[in-house]
Image (cartoon, helix red, strand yellow):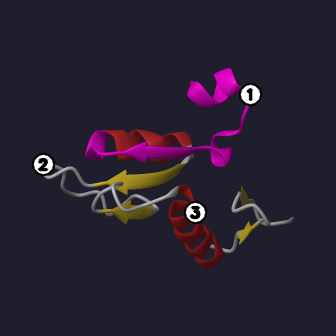
Amino acid sequence: RAAEILGLDPSECCVLEDSFAGVVAGKKAGMKIVGVRNGNTQNLEIADVVFDSLSDVNLSDICCDLKNTAQESGEKCGGGGEIEPPSK
């Protein structure tokens, strides 16, 4: 629903989530998922990238990790770190 409100395709969205249920919901929605462990969180491995904490992470770190994940799946990263779907 958030993507719809913003006028975006879900594949253009990135979700930061610290719960397994949130990661699953984001995946089902077709969004890129950044998992963040919070001490109680487990099983975030299905997220596109996982960080132990956001305290030492900045946006460029997240974009870089998502870029590397996208390249492994056949997508490419644009100049600003945004994820672009593979060309058809």
User: Which mark is first along the chain, 2 or 3?
Assistant: 2
Count residues near mark 3 (Cα–Cα under 10 Å), then give few for <14, some for 14-19, many for 20+: few
The residue mark sitting in front, 3 or 1, is 3
Q: Which residue has dot 2 on it?
A: 40
Q: Is residue 38 left or right of residue 88?
A: left
Kindly identify the residue that appears in the image at 27 percent across and 43 percent down: 19
The residue lying furthest to the bottom in this view is 72
Please identify the quadrant where the C terminus is shown: bottom right
Q: Secondary structure at mark 1?
A: loop
Q: Amino acid at mark 3?
A: Ser
Magenta-colored span: 1-21
Query: Which residue is nearer to you in this view: 76 or 56?
Result: 56
Q: Position of residue 5 (x, y in %)?
A: 66, 21
Q: Which residue has dot 3 on it?
A: 60
Query: Which residue is nearer to you in this view: 72 or 51?
Result: 51
Please identify the quadrant where the N terminus is shown: top right
Q: Position of residue 48 (x, y in %)?
A: 46, 62
User: Which mark is first along the chain, 1 or 3?
Assistant: 1
Q: Secondary structure at mark 3?
A: helix
Q: Secondary structure at mark 2?
A: loop
Q: From mark 3 to mark 1, how far is it between C-alphas? A: 24 Å
